[in-house]
Image (tube, grey):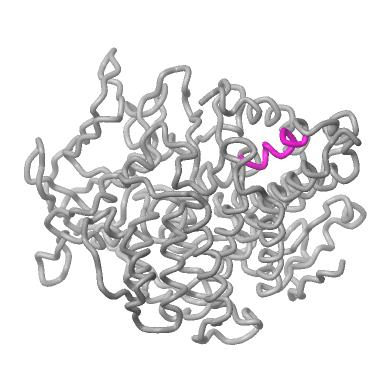
Amino acid sequence: MKTKKTLYILWAAILSIGVMSCSDDFLELPPEASVVDENFYQNDNQLLAATAPLYNLGWFDYNDKASYNLGDFRGGSAYSAYNDRENVEFNTTANTPENVAAWRAFYNVVAQANVTIYNINQFATEDVSEEMKTHCIAEARFMRALAYRYLVMNWEEVPVIVDNIKILDNPYNVKRNTVSSVWKFITHEFRAAARDLPETPRLEGRVTKWAAEGMLARTYLTRAGVPENYGLQEERTVTRDQAFLDSAKYFADRVINLSGASLLTNYADLFRTPYDNNPESLFSLQWVFVDANSWGTQNSTPAYLTHYAELGNNGDGWGGDKGATFWMLSLYDGFNPISPSGDTLKGHTADARLKATFMLPGMVYDELAYQDGANVKEGYKVPFNGGDGANALNYAAVKKYVVGRLDPEEGTKQFYSHDTYMLRLAEIYLIYAEAVLGNNESTTDGTALEYFNRIHERATRERVTSITYKDIFEERVKEFAMEGMIWYDLVRLHYYNPTEAYKIIELQDRGIYFIEPNEVDNPTEWTIYKTLWDDNRSFNASSGNFKIPLPAVEVSIAPNLLQDPVPYDFNE
């Protein structure tokens, strides 16, 4: 793992001095003293090194905690009983830390991409091949488009900035752009990246044509539901654009049949080490562990998700109050209500994704090493702490991205090198199925069913003969829980059917619960009780709280962000 990421380590450390030392506001103005001149961009290898931080450093503040806070806590697939409650309770404010961190991270990526493109065009010497310049600019455009995808889905109208140098004279006069024009920009950038990126990665983990076309499939599926005047009219249900649905289907089909990517046979292997850059991954953030001084290039997220210090590195493991929501657990086939009110679930599931995503008491994970007194042992067993049924609490703790106690050479406290999925082939299969479903209530289309069943059957060993939107949505929830995805599925739905998005959120039980195994050793079923003394179980969603508010610190610096949005001018 160390060998394959040498280039990332070396140049991420160098460029962090320049690109990431700029101001914390959303414009991320380029620093005056940074590695951006003709002394650096002298050959093809240096250009590849220049784009390396786009795969980790720029995304760090988002990946650190904001990814699961927004994607899973707001999405309703996971919760924290005592922390991050603003996101759990669907009350993210202008000062919520993950709101500010995510905004900062995405505009960091935009700034890095913009400055990289500028520097390549200005300072690349004649020893740099045109092919490499085209390739590295395409990498930057890919990352910029992805950052704007997150920006527009979280904050709706946002400023599109493509040249940070150009706005230096009046940096805080930037206005927001309309939602539909931001999506047009994103599409334009991914199409350019797909045109210029190679079919196979230049270095392991680098983006390819197929990563860009996969993002186009995702983009067109979303754009199909975005009205041209979105945000300027009263919320209403709209019919999804068939041309965009067809484009989503077209690009999904190309990735499925031409990319060479393939599903892993065993779902759990996606999150067992070493899983980086496996055949199912179309694009992952490329994290590296150098040493405890290389902050920002490593993956810190496992420290916050691991539920016991015995499983973490050097005592990290601060996820003791995080886990699946009651609603999330209710989606797995086999967990059935045993009380008229639905307050108690009982059973077990054949769905392999549960154990790979969340830990229930008594489950054993042979691949996880843990600290046992003075010794490190393998084969972690999730403890059952006991309790008095519905008067107690414990959690279906997070398993996904939890890798256990590592060898000191592989990581240390808050320093992990395991990558973060940003696009998997599994999503492309489900995008195809949803694009075929389109505006219909259900579909029995043979290809759509085949692709849906490749995902469903891998986890459950069962096949279905017809699918609805609800089937696809719940399949996505179970497939991608704890991958920072579910909130964005709700946003995609909200674009064209806000009433249904609000209904899903309001029906999600996000309250405290207690899990009891039928046996402490080798349990075969579990009973899940809603904790009686927790009244904060469901939360209302509406036009007043669905959109995440602009970070207060940004509005105070750039009050023009409060002005009415304008369409992005593609001629500038």
Q: Which of 280 and 272 is in front in this view?
A: 280
Give the answer, above or below, for where 242 lies relative to 146. below
Q: Is residue 12 left or right of residue 269?
A: right
Give the answer, above or below, for where 246 lies relative to 120. below
User: Residue 51: horizontal and vertical position, in percent?
Assistant: 71, 39
Q: Nearer the viewer, residue 109 or 9?
A: 9
Q: Can residue 546 be seen in this view?
A: no
Q: Furthest-left residue in view? A: 519
Q: Is residue 50 magenta?
A: yes
Q: In this view, does 211 lie to the left or right of 173?
A: left
| Image-quadrant location for residue 99 | bottom right
Give the answer, above or below, for where 51 lies relative to 560. above
- Residue at position x 74%, y 63% in the image: 159
Q: Give the range drawn in magenta.
A: 47-55
- Residue at position x 77%, y 56% in the image: 557
Q: Is residue 92 visible?
A: yes
Report the number of discs. 0
Q: In this view, does 358 lie to the left or right of 484?
A: left
- Residue at position x 30%, y 64% in the image: 509
Q: Furthest-top residue in view? A: 374
- Residue at position x 44%, y 47% in the image: 280
What is the magenta segment's predominant secondary structure? helix
| Image-quadrant location for residue 285 | top right
User: Residue 354: horizontal and vertical position, in percent?
Assistant: 26, 50
